[in-house]
Amino acid sequence: MGSNRGGRANSKMTQLVLETYGRQCWLRLKGCTGLATTKDHVIPYSLGGDDSLENFRPACRSCNSKRQNMVVSGYGASVVIVMGPPAAGKSTYVREHASAADIVIDLDEIARALMPVRPEQTHVYPAHVRHVAIKARQAAISAARRLKERVTVWIIQAIPRPDDLADWRRLGYQVVTIDPGRAVVEDRARRLRPEIMRQQVARYYATYGEHTAPAVPAPSPLASVATGHETEPDW
Ligand SMILES: [Zn+2]
């Protein structure tokens, strides 16, 4: 039977992939079992990747299903995560570095776009607007991570969860930290931004410390973009 033959060829290819590349999962996302038993398309089939040995890598079942058809940065779209405390200048950084064809996903901008009159002050919007904006952001991230066009997707996420950060790095996403220093940020937060921002500044440094990260760290190999968690304040 055709399907039977297909199944045998398929499992033969899986064997070949495991023999060629070894049994270590190449993705190693959060929840990885380490032991590869499946083959993962480097370039997803839906993005034009083929079923050749060169386009397969060994992956554990958990990572394979978690990744789905998200791009590994550079095969299709590239993803840059821009993190850092509130009032650090993340939006400005993206404006200065993005090309006209790129995608920028910024919760604050999405929330403002959803309101009939854009508030004068950024980062000030009601909870129901924020709720809708988070959903819109998730949908945008999900679609942007599956683009085959070789554009850059800039995702502004102030305080990512460290687990998510590790996953993103696995998928080759570049992580850029914008941090002019705690004193500068605290001063700006006091002058420009609502009170809640000061709490966010404190939370950022509690999570990531006060080291001055290089402005543009070298891209590190391979991840799953944060699916924006409702409870996670995200500037
Ligand atoms: Zn794995």
Image: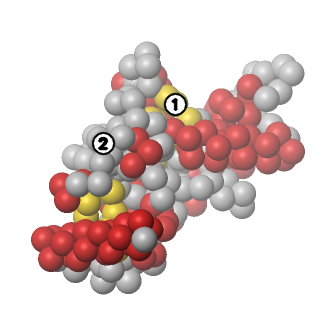
Most distant residue in the left direction: 20
**Viewer-side label of 1, 2:** 2
Q: Is residue 231 above or below residue 152?
A: below
Residue 10 marker: none
In the picture, measured across the screen, residue 206 lies left or right of residue 197, that is: left
The picture places residue 134, in percent across and down from the top left corner, at 71, 46
Residue at 30 percent across and 48 percent down: it is 50
Mark 2 highlights which residue? 75
Kind of residue indicated by mark 1: Val
Of residues 60 and 167, which is closer to you in this image?
60
Q: Is residue 106 above or below residue 224?
A: above
The secondary structure type at the circle numbered 1 is strand
Residue at 34 percent across and 30 percent down: it is 150
Quarter location, residue 10: bottom left
The picture places residue 159, in percent across and down from the top left corner, at 53, 54
Kind of residue indicated by mark 2: Tyr
Q: CA distance from mark 1 to mark 2?
A: 19 Å
Number of residues whose C-alpha sits closer than 10 Å to that of mark 2, classed few (under 14), some (14–19) or many (20 or more): some
Of residues 1 and 186, which is closer to you in this image?
1
Mark 1 highlights which residue? 104
The picture places residue 63, in percent across and down from the top left corner, at 42, 70
In the picture, measured across the screen, residue 138 lies left or right of residue 47, that is: right
